[in-house]
Image (cartoon, rainbow, N blue to C red):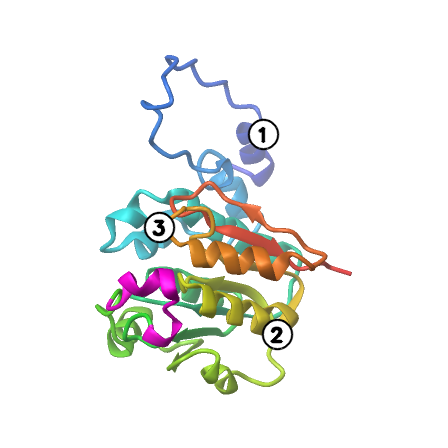
Amino acid sequence: MSIAETMKRLLHREPEQSEKTLSWRELRGFSHPERYSKNYLKYQMLGGAVSPEEDAEKFSRGLVSHSNDMARFYSFCLIADQISKDKVAGDFAELGVWQGNTAELLASFARRFDRTLYLLDTFEGLPEVDLGRDEKHLAGAFTDTSVEAVRARVGDDRVEFIKGYFPETASQLPSDARFAVVHIDCDLYAPMLSSLEYFYPRMSPGGFILMHDYSSLCWDGAEKAVDEFFADKPEAIMPLPDLAGTAVMRKNRR
């Protein structure tokens, strides 16, 4: 079958039968963006780089919470497609890696787009020095990780591991680095604010910062830091409907 014939079939397929009306409680499953489902063949023909099944396995491996958070997974996929489409320059970075689920996904995108992914974490849990007065109960959280375990999972190709306390470890990033995608998942007020102060001015025009936990109501420090930082910026944030309420900002292109 020729490309033209394939495209004709995709664009003129018969409408699907109407489904039974369900309540929102019955509709707790997730939907798949059409570019990765019924229009996936067209997506591939247009040069799309996302492999939904393979990439979803990396994102969700070993974590039930990730398996049920496909809105977050597809947000990463759509952003990866957008920076490719718009030719946004720059590397990827993640601050707050834990066991490497999102790192493994981002590493795959970095390799496909010929970028470098920088992974920054203590790889020992939340630093006590960052625990504010209302965050002391989180001492000892996220210690079930190590740089060796994440490296074994993610691999070394196009990935740089930076272990230690941020922002002190920022000196290990290239002084002239520019970023297309930055994922911040550090939970607490102090590291969220310092990471925004560091990465925001280094974002390429059109680049994306994803800030996890913004609207979950579990991590008040993260929400407070984001609101404070963007109060005087030309860009605004947009909340996403994923499990922990990620917020996303796109750097102005002018």
Query: In the rendered image of this protein, does residue 193 appear above or below residue 159?
Result: above
Q: Which residues are magenta?
A: 127-140
In this rendering, position of residue 51 left or right of residue 153? right
Q: Residue at coordinates 47% horizontally, 84% vertically from top-left?
A: 168
Identify residue for label 1. Answer: 8
Distance, label 3 to label 2, CA atoms, is: 27 Å
Q: Earlier in the sequence, mark 2 or mark 1?
A: 1
> Few, some or many C-alpha atoms within 10 Å of disc 2 (few <14, some 14-19, many ≥20)?
many
Instruction: Say whether residue 128 is magenta.
Output: yes
Give 218 or 152, whichever is nearer the viewer: 218
Identify residue for label 3. Answer: 56
Give 22 or 104, whichever is nearer the viewer: 22
In this rendering, position of residue 184 left or right of residue 104? right
Q: Position of residue 120 (x, y in %)?
A: 41, 75
Q: Earlier in the sequence, mark 1 or mark 3?
A: 1
Which three-letter amino acid code belongs to the residue tagged 1?
Answer: Lys
Q: Position of residue 81 (x, y in %)?
A: 55, 53
Which three-letter amino acid code belongs to the residue tagged 2?
Answer: Arg
Asked if marks 1 and 3 touch (Cβ < 8 Å), the reply is: no
Which three-letter amino acid code belongs to the residue tagged 3?
Answer: Ala
SS label for mark 3: helix
Query: In the rendered image of this protein, does residue 9 appear above or below residue 236?
Result: above
SS label for mark 1: helix
Q: Position of residue 20 (x, y in %)?
A: 37, 12
Identify residue for label 2. Answer: 178
Within the image, what quadrant is residue 129 found in?
A: bottom left
